Image (cartoon, grey):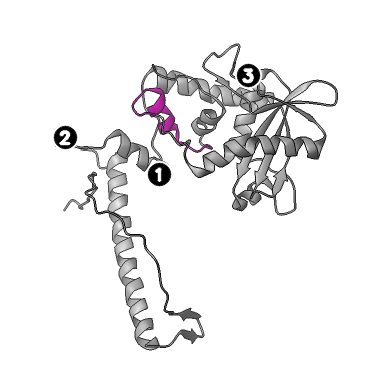
Amino acid sequence: MSDLRIGGTRASSILGVGFQTPLEVWAEMTERTQREDISALERIEAGVFMEDGAARWFSHRTGLAVEPSPGIVVDKIHPWLSGSPDRLIVLPDGTRGVLEAKNCHSMAKCDWRTEDGATLVPPGYRVQLQTYLRITGLEVGYFAAVIGGNHLETPRMDKDEAFIEAMLEELEYFMRQHIAKDIPPDVTYRDLGILKRLFPKDIGRSILIADSHARESQALSELIRVKSEISALSKSRDEAQAIIFAAMEDATEIVTPLGTATWKWQKAHHQAKEAKVVESRVLRTKETK
């Protein structure tokens, strides 16, 4: 049975600011592909184990009491919109809010702070929290974002009705136009992986695009041009390296008015892997004469 529910994570992906692409979400919801099991990935495991610690750290930092997740909550108007907030919090006036715990890489610190120190919330996480404020009917949300294992950000985010209205409009369109009508969303540069999963093998047929101004014709022409430029650049790179190598001989460093380079001896340890045959489709291009 297909899973036609949209939660905070899917909502952010549908709006183009999530970990998946709209096409990936469509493929899962229409059962073209199965949702990948990523529970064993270390970063996912870390998020699960860090969630409770992030919530307790948030409570210690802010003084706000934290309560368990309410479980799956379904929107009263849009039954396809649902989700499970990480935790609830008790605000000073006794009302409740939503708490979302995030475990982030150390390099993500800049995603939560501007250069002048102002607090930011990454767009995808903003969509998630506004989704949970919508379905719970609560007015206030917070994040407990642990960054690099030793830094905590606790930004507050109030319910934004205008944002939610615009978000729901986009999600309703996705459900109506792409799920109900079974029409895939437009592809983007991030969709190469899902397209290879959707169409792993060819069947020998040929497709004719007669219009040279068609999107597909223009895309193929652009691909041929870019591949040609990459090839030319690769040759220029290799020639420049060869000139530098010849000039350096057994020297470690070369210094010129325009730059420096080093050519050092080093050892790299590569783990031996069992040889195996990998079958996949390969894209080759040729310009029409």
Q: Is 82 colored magenta in this rendering? A: no
Residue at the spot x=79%, y=40% of the render?
A: 61
* Mark identifier at residue 135: 3
- Point out the frontmost of discs 1 and 2: 2
Secondary structure beneath label 3: helix
For this orientation, the residue located farthest to the right is 93
Vertical placement of 227 versus 98: above or below?
A: below
Give residue 57's position: percent from left, percent from top: 74, 39
| Badge 1 vs badge 2, beta-carbon distance below 8 Å | no
Vertical placement of 24 versus 103: above or below?
A: above
- Point out the frontmost of discs 3 and 1: 3
* Mark identifier at residue 189: 1
- From the image, tell me which residue sits under label 2: 203
Please name the amino acid that badge 3 sits on: Ile
Q: What range of the chain is rendered magenta?
A: 17-34
Of pointers 2 and 3, the one earlier in the residue sequence: 3
For this orientation, the residue located farthest to the left is 204
Q: Residues within 10 Å of mark 2 (few under 14, many from 20)?
A: few
Secondary structure beneath label 1: helix
One can see residue 137 in this view? yes
C-alpha distance separating marks 2 and 3: 45 Å
Vertical placement of 144 versus 276: above or below?
A: above
C-alpha distance separating marks 1 and 2: 24 Å
* Horizontal side of residue 141 vs 283, given as left or right: right
Please name the amino acid that badge 2 sits on: Ile
Give residue 259's position: percent from left, percent from top: 50, 80
Give residue 219's position: percent from left, percent from top: 31, 45
* Mark identifier at residue 270: none
